[in-house]
Amino acid sequence: MSQNGMTYRDVPIADRVDIDNLFSSYAYLIDDGDADGWIDLFVDDGVFDVPGLNRFEGPEGLRNICNVVIEGSQGNWRHTATNVLVTPGPHADEVAVRLRTLVTDWNVDPAGTQFNDYRGTLVRIDGHWRIKELIATPTKVIV
């Protein structure tokens, strides 16, 4: 339940589908090495935060983390975004999200895996959902 007492059931289904597709795009774009496309999923002052590691803000900061992932993966990491839960924000053009990601690393044999919990805020701008802030907390790494 959100802070305003509303639940995921109060988010229109079309918005939930758009948001699910946003996170599918998030995974494909980073795995395909498309930094510009990945950055475009965020608002101009968007934030990607990995507590205890670093906080990346705005296009330059987002490009930094994106390049680290692209270079580190050598095209062999696969991100899977799942269990996307969307709850209403303080107004119709803002929602809170929670999701999980599984990242597999095919640079090693057997493949390594990392599980992450994500929480964040999305805003709708010109009819499109964009990431305002995304906090990624690694929960388990298996190499």
Image (cartoon, rainbow, N blue to C red):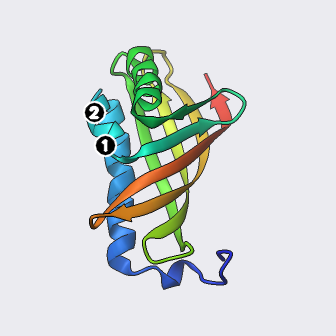
Q: Which mark is residue 109?
A: none
Q: Residue at x 51, y 83 (%)?
A: 9
Q: Where is residue 75 in the image (x, y as percent from the top left)?
A: 33, 21
Residue 32 at least partly seen: no
Q: To which residue does mark 1 refer?
A: 40
Given residues 131 and 43, the one toward you in this image is 43
The amino acid type of the residue labelled 1 equals Asp
Q: Quadrant of residue 90?
A: bottom right
In the rendered image, the vertical position of residue 11 relative to residue 26, given as above or below: below
Circle 2 sits in a helix, a strand or a loop, which is it? helix
Q: Which residue is drawn at 47% across and 59% down?
A: 122
Residue 31 in the figure: left or right of residue 62: left
Residue 40 at least partly seen: yes
Q: Which residue is drawn at 49% across and 61% down?
A: 84
User: Tag 1: Cα neighbours inside 10 Å, few (<14), some, or many (≥20)?
Assistant: some
Q: Which residue is drawn at 68% across and 75% down?
A: 3
Q: Where is residue 12 in the image (x, y as percent from the top left)?
A: 39, 81
The amino acid type of the residue labelled 2 equals Asp
Q: Are marks 2 and 1 in contact (CB under 8 Å)?
A: yes
In the rendered image, the vertical position of residue 89 relative to residue 57, given as above or below: below
Q: Position of residue 132 (x, y in %)?
A: 48, 52
Circle 1 sits in a helix, a strand or a loop, which is it? loop
Q: How many marks?
A: 2
Quarter of the picture containing the N terminus is bottom right
Q: Where is residue 92 in the image (x, y as percent from the top left)?
A: 45, 77
Given residues 115 and 130, the one toward you in this image is 130
